[in-house]
Structures are given as structure tokens and as C-alpha cells.
Image (cartoon, helix red, strand yellow):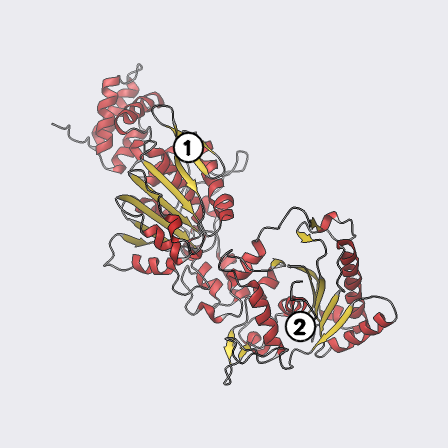
């Protein structure tokens, strides 16, 4: 006959008695207490266990390990308790709700806003699942859209947590192994990525009685891979899908699963959204002190690390209330009609974060020994060097210069106000960048002439004339090309899905095509090393169509009417990429 579970008072009395007995509890008593603690409700168990001294806790945990196979078996049904009691870390209400849903549901879907600790909490969940289950009984698989996200975002949290808490086993870049009772190293967790359309890559993962799949950055997971994870959820298996809602993929796998979690007819799936407005720094929720910062950092609230209203307000001002970025990263909702932007923000973010190639034929700009070339990104030797210039139309607009070297777009100059009033001064600044581009082309051994594309509408016309004259006088050797963006497009294919109406529309669509991710690699053909404002401006214009079925990019006037800045930096980028006249044997990037 089982001993009745101890009441809150009985557990406290047992702990008090053990403290008064200097020799500590005996092994037999530890076994009995371990048995009883395993069967009481979680709040009673945690309160009672905390009242024992360290020596007695060690005795009890030894008996728990004997009974459950894990030293941390007391926390097998309470991930939040493990994070607080064993890891000694602080969490807030939404994070607690997420991790404690894992033992209860097959699928826990978490559409999350910016900076709310989604990857942090996913890393702690992996530590819990690996520690509370005997080696060989639980396999934890983590994945994300790209391997660098697995390696550089989630697994650093996992490695740090395991090392700091002194959890068993050892952890390398994306793998955690724990010795079993016979001393064999058993893999309990690992991270990987799968090809976007290879559903078979998710097969063969089972092999243990229990399985936990953690999908980080779930908003970017392809449908085939998402469906592959669903096929694994048999027996004692659970899935955590967590990430920002997809901004440019209507009806993505993540969106469909989040909708399922809100459907009362799907009891095995739950959706727990975390909007940025849920942040304790905004709601005023009382949260514990931060335990994650290094020693020596003054004691501070966990809320300091979370987004506040200043971030929210600035983001809404920069993007606009109806922008997919705001809908996804502030409100944690899925934008409807996310394809309405000329260039989706996710394509731009991917192009900004794509890794630089290395190896033979590649060189860092800062290693060329040229004055002013301090960037650390790599370019290919022999790359084509081009400039794009958008001359300010009035005092409120910006004069911008961008450069593309091979496939890398970079910011070179911007100014506004009275600095742009003098056309000669503007032309001299362009010449300065032209000469720097020529020196770079020479250092790279480029066989191509530097080309400088300038919007010659309005004030740009004078700059084009002066630079062409200076070229004729031998001050530079570059090709100066004036671009009239209101003209008809260079190419017009009546059978194309997206037919530009003007040259400006063609410029935007050309850049869109180069940034669009390749289905095989998941990345586009450009690397963007540009400033924050330029990235926002590239994602600002809406995609529209006229009565003739042509694509019309939202005008500057319309953008300004809804509170957006003139996209002068974006158009400097478009100009450096775009070629307004046929170039023999040359595409946009060679």
C-alpha cells in the first residue's frame, strides 16, 4: 500500500526535523522522502524540497536518481521549476507558460515579437529535457531555417546553460552527449537543418522512447520540413515551434500550425503568442532579478533586457503602423497580404546577414591598403565596381551615394540640407567617390570600367553634365550615366508576370529579383552591407498595379502622405545595381 502523499505541513515538518538532526536524514528516510516527493503536486514538492539542507537534498536526489534514472527526476514534469530551482535563473510569466505547456501538449506554437527571449527560453527547455530524462530515453532535435541560426543563435544558449549549471555530459558546437550507466556517451541533443523541400530529411530521427523537437525561427521553416516534423509526433513526442511570424509567406507552415493551436477542436496543439506589448518592461509585471549576466554586473531587474515602449514607438515611426515588420515583430501577428511590399523585409534582413565568402580569389577591402577602405567584408578579385547617386531634390531629401562591388552593396555617403545646395560641391563629392572606386577597381584587377549611375531628374542633371565634362578633361576615366527614372523601361516583356510601367518601376523590380531567395539555397544574389535607414526604405514601398496590368511602385508622394521618408537611400542602392542601357556580355552582377 502506497504511503499517502505528504501535506504541505508534513513536508515542512520532515525538513525541519532533518535540520535539527545534525547527522542528517538516513538513507532509508531519504528513499521514502524521494518516493513521496515524486508523487505530490509540483508546488508542494518544490516548497518542501527547498526546506531541506544541502546535504539532505543531495541524499534525496541520489534516491530520486535511483528511482527515475536521473538526478533531476523531481523536475521531470515542471520545466519552469527546473529553470528556477536547478539552473537558478529567472523567467517571467509568458516564458513560464511556454515551457510548462511542453509536458501537456504535442505541439506548442509560439509566435513571438522582437526581443522577448524566445531563443533564450528554447535553450533552457533543451537543458531541462536532456537533464531530467535518463540518457538514451529522450532525444532532442533542434532545427531552424539555416544552419548558422542553429549554430550561432540557439546552441550558444544551450552550451552556456549546461556548463554554468554543471549538468552532466559535454557539449560541442551543436551536440550534447551524456554518459549512460555503463559509461557510454549517449547523444541526447543535436542541431541540424534540412533542405527546404526535402521532407525525407526529417525521417529516421526516432529511436528513443521520447522525442522533443525544437523549431527555432519557425516563421521561416518550409512547409515540407514542417510537415515532416508533424510525422514524427507519435508516442511520447512533443514539438516547440517558436519564432517571429513570417512577413512574406502567406499561409506558411508556422501560420497554419498557430491557427490550429487556437482551434478548440485541436486539443493536442496550443498557441501561446508573445507580443512585444507583453514585455514586463511595458506591462509593469514584477519580475525577478536577472541571474544571466556575468558576475560584477550590478544587480538589476530582468525587465531591463526586454523591449520597452521607446523601442515600440521608434519602430512604428520608422516602418509605419501597417508595415509587415510592425505587425509581426511588435504585435506577434501574421501579416495578411504580406506580398504587398515590393521587397519583403525578410529578404533584406537575409541579405544583410548572409556570410561573406572566403578562400582563393576573395579579399577583404581593409586588406587592400587603400585609404578609406576599412570594411571587413570580402569581395572577389576582378569584381565590377559601380556607383549609384541620388541627388537631393529639395532640403528635406538626401543626397546619397552607394557602391556595388561584385555582389556587395555598401553605403558610401549621405547628406541633407544646406550641404546639398551647391551643385558644384555635390559634383565634387561624387568625383571623390568616383576616384575612390577607380582605385578600388585597379587594386582588385577589375577589367571593367567603373560606371556611375546618377538620377538626372531635377538637380541631378547639372551633376551629370559636370562629371562628364571632367571625364573629357581627364580628371577621371569612369562612365557617367544619367538615368531618367520617369522614362519607359529598358525592357518590356508582354508575357512577364511583373511588367514595369516606368524605368523607376524596372529598377525596383530588378533589385527585388536579385534579393529574392533561391529555392535551393534560401538566399538571394546580393549581400547588403548598408545602414539601417536604407534597409527600412528598401522595404517601404507598396506593390501596385495600374489599369493596364503593369507594376507600379508606390510613389514618393504617397509614401510621404502616410508618414514615410522619401526613399533616397534605397534609390541610391537601386541606381548602383541597375543598368539603364544594354551592356554587352554583362549581367547586373558581372
Residue 313: x, y in percent? 51, 61
Give left or right: position of 352 versus 397.
left
**Nearest to viewer (mark 2 / mark 1):** 1
Residue beneath label 2, please? Answer: 396
Residue sitting farthest toward the right: 473
**Residue 291 appearing in the image:** no
Residue sitting farthest toward the bottom: 547
Residue neighbourhood size for the residue with mark 2, other residues' Cα within 10 Å, grouped as few (<14), some (14–19), many (≥20): few
Helix, strand or loop status at disc 2: loop
Helix, strand or loop status at disc 1: strand
Q: What is the count of numbered marks?
A: 2
The foreground one among 340 and 160 is: 340
Mark 2 near mark 1, Cβ–Cβ under 8 Å?
no
Residue neighbourhood size for the residue with mark 1, other residues' Cα within 10 Å, grouped as few (<14), some (14–19), many (≥20): many
Instruction: Tell me the distance, in whole angstroms, between the alpha carbons under discs 2 and 1.
Output: 59 Å
Residue 399 drawn above or below residue 194? below
Find residue 318 and report its image quarter: bottom right
Which label sits on residue 113?
Answer: none
Residue beneath label 1, please? Answer: 177
Residue 225: x, y in percent? 39, 53
**Residue 206 appearing in the image:** yes
Q: Quadrant of the N terminus?
A: top left
Residue 436 drawn above or below residue 74? below
Residue at image x 29%, y 18%? 20
Question: Which one is earlier in the sequence, the residue at label 2 or at label 1?
Answer: 1
The foreground one among 200 and 513 is: 200
Residue 539: x, y in percent? 54, 66
Residue sitting farthest toward the left: 1
Residue sitting farthest toward the top: 23
Residue 190: x, y in percent? 42, 40
The foreground one among 18 and 169 is: 169
Amino acid at each position: 500500500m502506497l504511503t499517502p502523499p505528504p501535506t504541505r505541513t508534513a513536508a515542512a515538518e520532515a525538513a525541519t526535523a532533518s535540520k535539527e538532526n545534525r547527522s542528517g536524514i538516513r538513507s532509508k528516510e531519504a528513499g521514502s522522502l524521494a518516493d513521496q516527493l515524486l508523487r505530490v503536486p509540483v508546488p508542494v514538492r518544490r516548497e518542501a524540497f527547498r526546506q531541506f539542507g544541502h546535504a539532505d537534498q543531495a541524499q534525496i536526489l541520489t534516491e530520486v536518481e535511483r528511482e527515475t534514472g536521473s538526478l533531476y527526476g523531481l523536475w521531470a514534469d515542471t520545466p519552469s521549476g527546473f529553470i528556477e530551482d536547478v539552473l537558478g535563473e529567472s523567467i517571467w510569466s509568458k516564458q513560464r507558460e511556454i515551457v510548462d505547456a511542453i509536458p501537456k501538449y504535442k505541439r506548442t506554437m509560439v509566435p513571438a515579437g522582437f526581443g522577448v527571449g524566445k531563443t533564450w527560453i528554447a535553450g533552457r527547455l533543451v537543458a531541462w529535457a536532456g537533464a531530467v530524462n535518463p540518457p538514451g530515453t529522450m532525444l532532442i532535435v533542434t532545427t531552424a531555417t539555416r544552419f548558422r541560426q542553429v549554430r550561432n543563435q540557439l546552441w550558444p544558449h544551450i552550451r552556456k546553460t549546461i556548463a554554468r549549471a554543471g549538468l552532466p555530459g559535454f557539449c560541442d558546437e551543436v551536440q550534447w552527449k551524456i554518459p549512460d550507466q555503463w559509461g557510454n556517451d549517449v547523444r541526447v541533443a543535436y542541431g541540424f537543418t534540412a533542405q527546404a523541400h526535402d521532407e525525407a530529411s526529417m525521417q529516421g530521427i526516432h529511436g528513443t522512447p521520447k522525442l522533443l523537437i525544437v523549431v527555432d525561427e519557425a516563421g521561416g521553416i518550409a512547409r515540407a520540413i514542417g510537415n515532416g516534423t508533424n510525422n514524427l509526433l507519435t508516442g511520447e513526442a512533443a514539438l516547440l515551434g517558436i519564432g517571429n511570424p513570417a512577413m512574406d509567406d502567406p499561409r506558411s507552415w508556422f501560420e497554419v500550425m498557430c491557427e490550429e493551436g487556437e482551434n478548440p477542436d485541436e486539443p493536442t496543439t496550443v498557441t501561446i503568442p508573445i507580443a512585444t506589448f507583453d514585455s514586463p518592461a511595458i506591462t509593469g509585471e514584477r519580475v525577478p532579478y536577472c541571474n544571466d549576466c556575468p558576475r560584477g554586473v550590478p544587480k538589476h531587474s530582468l525587465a531591463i533586457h526586454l523591449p520597452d515602449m521607446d523601442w515600440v514607438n521608434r519602430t512604428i515611426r520608422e516602418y509605419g503602423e501597417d508595415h509587415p515588420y510592425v505587425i509581426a515583430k511588435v504585435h506577434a501577428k501574421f501579416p495578411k497580404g504580406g506580398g504587398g511590399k515590393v521587397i519583403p523585409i525578410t529578404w533584406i534582413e537575409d541579405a544583410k546577414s548572409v556570410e561573406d565568402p572566403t578562400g582563393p580569389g576573395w579579399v577583404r577591402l581593409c586588406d587592400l591598403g587603400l585609404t578609406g577602405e576599412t570594411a571587413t567584408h570580402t569581395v572577389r578579385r576582378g569584381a565590377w565596381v559601380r556607383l549609384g547617386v541620388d541627388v537631393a531634390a529639395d532640403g528635406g531629401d538626401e543626397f546619397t551615394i552607394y557602391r556595388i562591388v561584385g555582389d556587395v552593396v555598401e553605403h558610401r555617403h549621405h547628406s541633407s540640407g544646406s550641404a546639398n545646395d551647391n551643385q558644384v560641391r555635390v559634383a565634387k563629392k561624387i568625383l571623390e567617390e568616383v576616384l575612390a572606386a577607380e582605385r578600388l577597381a585597379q587594386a582588385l584587377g577589375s577589367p571593367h570600367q567603373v560606371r556611375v549611375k546618377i538620377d538626372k531628374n531635377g538637380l541631378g542633371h547639372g551633376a551629370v553634365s559636370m562629371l562628364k565634362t571632367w571625364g573629357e578633361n581627364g580628371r577621371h576615366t569612369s562612365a557617367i550615366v544619367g538615368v531618367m527614372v520617369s522614362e519607359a523601361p529598358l525592357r518590356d516583356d508582354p508575357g512577364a508576370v511583373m511588367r514595369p510601367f516606368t524605368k523607376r518601376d524596372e529598377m525596383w523590380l530588378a533589385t527585388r529579383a536579385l534579393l529574392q531567395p533561391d529555392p535551393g539555397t534560401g538566399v538571394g544574389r546580393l549581400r547588403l552591407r548598408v545602414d539601417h535607414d536604407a534597409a527600412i526604405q528598401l522595404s517601404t514601398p507598396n506593390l501596385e498595379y495600374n489599369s493596364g496590368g503593369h507594376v507600379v511602385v508606390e510613389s514618393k508622394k504617397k509614401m510621404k502622405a502616410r508618414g514615410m521618408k522619401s526613399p533616397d537611400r534605397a534609390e541610391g542602392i537601386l541606381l548602383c545595381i541597375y543598368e539603364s542601357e544594354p551592356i554587352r556580355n554583362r549581367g547586373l552582377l558581372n
